[in-house]
Image: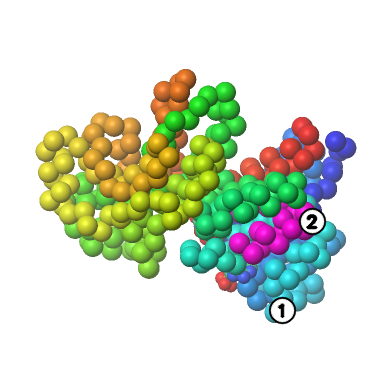
Amino acid sequence: MCKGMEVKICLIGMGNVGTSFLQLLKEKQDYIRVNFNFNCKLVAIFEHDGALINNGGIDLDSVLEDYTNLRKNQYWTSNVKAQDLISTLDIEICIETTPTNPNTGEPALSHIIEALKNNINVISSNKAPFYLQYAKIQNLAEKMNCLVKFEATVASCVPALSIKESLIGNTISRIRAILNGTNNYILSRMTAEGVSFSVALKEAQELGYAETDPTLDINGYDAAGKLVILSNELLGWSKSIEDVKIKGITKITPHALELAKLDGYVIKHLAIAEDNNLTVEPRLVKRDSPLNIQGTLNLIELQTKYAGSIILIGKGAGGFEAASAILNDLINIVKKRRGF
Ligand SMILES: NC(=O)c1ccc[n+]([C@@H]2O[C@H](COP(=O)([O-])OP(=O)(O)OC[C@H]3O[C@@H](n4cnc5c(N)ncnc54)[C@H](OP(=O)(O)O)[C@@H]3O)[C@@H](O)[C@H]2O)c1
């Protein structure tokens, strides 16, 4: 590989994750150049109402300094959509960080498909396309000889998916995980303080740990989506969210938690992949179990054939956390493509 090779990229969705990614890219530019011999050139940013496209490279300082600069830039065009313009871009990697409809995966699904059809590698922080259409995306990527990476979709920066590479000589037989920080926070508070579900939920919302509409979290759908992605990636399954038996946390009472406590247990909302079955539900866990993590943390326990249990724990959300997973994916794609 020659020194200073250029890798052209586009970003779709400059919100929390997208902006954090651009900031991280700016911070790490020199590090990437020195350690991996490439320069990242951002040639397009798409938002819901238009696009900034400059083949000569977008000035990161300007768009990061003031968000409104995006739309004031001479290369900004209003009322154009990423889906219609991806095919016109001369880029190697498309980074997809829009919000998604949990039932259709759109608009991210169409962005991903369109990029792959045009021989562009994809990085996404969006879960829905992968828990709804995993096989379709992977088959298309294979057909087009492209790479698709989505580390940020499960537990954000915790290397839940890329650990597969590190365990290539082992066999993973079961996954047990805590994949929704909101639910874990609520259950931790109910256990510690004896408060009701609704009081703990309100507290989580006030602290910004839960959405104004927390339905997808508390009914278990969010964790189920992540479990599908984990099991497909780590166990080689080909499941979608309809395959998951899902129970949320709304029916857990302080009384049930108290009874569990008397027997030395706590109740945790676990996502389990075992014996070809996917389950998300509240389960009793021994108080001294490593699964008994507190607050908004995420946990992934991999039961392996040759090394017993391996556990990853970390922050499952946050703009920079997700952005660091995206940058990791980006460097790995370039390394793989360039054969180093
Ligand atoms: N935040 C996290 O901690 C985290 C962690 C891991 C994964 N994720 C996932 O990453 C994705 C992005 O999250 P986020 O927190 O960055 O969301 P966000 O702050 O709402 O940002 C999304 C951005 O996408 C833009 N957008 C909306 N529709 C678009 C379209 N059709 N084309 C182009 N841009 C469009 C939005 O613009 P407007 O606001 O102007 O509509 C906004 O700038 C979500 O799927 C989320 O689940 C988030």
Q: Residues within 10 Å of mark 1 (few under 14, many from 20)?
A: few
Q: Considering only vertical position in the picture, is 212 above or below 37?
A: below
> What range of the chain is rendered magenta?
109-124
Residue lying farthest to the top in this orientation: 306
Q: Residue at x 45, y 35 (%)?
A: 312
The kind of residue on which mark 1 rests is Ser
Label 1 sits on a secondary structure element that is strand
Is residue 309 a member of the stretch shown in magenta? Answer: no
Residue 185 appears anywhere in the view: no
Name the residue nearer the viewer: 3 or 278: 278
Label 2 sits on a secondary structure element that is loop
Quadrant housing the N terminus:
top right
The quadrant where residue 289 appears = top left
Q: Residues within 10 Å of mark 2 (few under 14, many from 20)?
A: many
Name the residue nearer the viewer: 235 or 222: 235
Q: Position of residue 180 (x, y in %)?
A: 39, 51
Tell me the CA gap for discs 1 and 2: 21 Å
Say which residue label 2 marks: 91
Within the displayed image, which quadrant is ligand 1 positioned in?
A: bottom right
Residue lying farthest to the right in this orientation: 2
The quadrant where residue 201 appears = bottom left
Q: Considering only vertical position in the picture, is 138 above or below 205?
A: above
Q: Position of residue 294 (x, y in %)?
A: 32, 43
